[in-house]
Amino acid sequence: MPGMMLVSQLLVGLENYCVWSRSLMITLLAKIKLGFVDGSCQRNDYAAALHPQWDRYNTVVLSWILNSVSKELSVGIVFALSVTVVWRDLKDRFDKVDGSRIFFLHREIATLCQGSIH
């Protein structure tokens, strides 16, 4: 289970972060593990007797993320203790909006014509 690949594409950086993160979120939601990455399932929310179980699931989700990022990125997250911290770090690093790209897309949309009239 920890060695599973959950998404078909490895995260390599800015160019595929949005698709990668959405794909992984869908899969984690289906596996009832999304709370580990979005922060809604925190270790301290549970009794001390459940901490070892929480640690195990956190580690499983961390291994899934490690298996879904490039080797270059995995080096930076392999020693992390919290999946939530890893998820936020990846989001901060790669969830960037390219302002010039948005401008050009809006311009293309504004100048679009359906078919041509002769």
Image (spheres, helix red, strand yellow):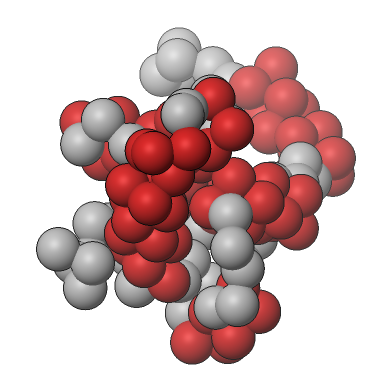
Horizontal side of 70 relative to 53 (left or right) equals right
Residue 83 percent across, percent down from the top left: 53, 52
Please give the name of the residue rendered at 34% of the width and 56% of the height, measured from the top-left corner: 56
Place residue 79 in its image quadrant: bottom right
Farthest residue, direction left? 1
Q: Can residue 38 be seen from the camera position used here?
A: no
Residue 49 percent across, percent down from the top left: 39, 39
Residue 17 percent across, percent down from the top left: 55, 54
Residue 114 against residue 102 in the figure, above or below: above
Q: Can residue 32 be seen from the camera position used here?
A: yes
Q: Which of 110 and 89 is in front in this view?
A: 89
Residue 57 against residue 34 in the figure, above or below: below
Residue 57 percent across, percent down from the top left: 33, 50
Horizontal side of 18 relative to 85 (left or right) equals left
Q: Nearer the viewer, residue 92 or 2?
A: 2
Horizontal side of 88 relative to 59 (left or right) equals right
Place residue 111 in its image quadrant: top right
Please give the name of the residue rendered at 70% of the width and 17% of the height, measured from the top-left corner: 110
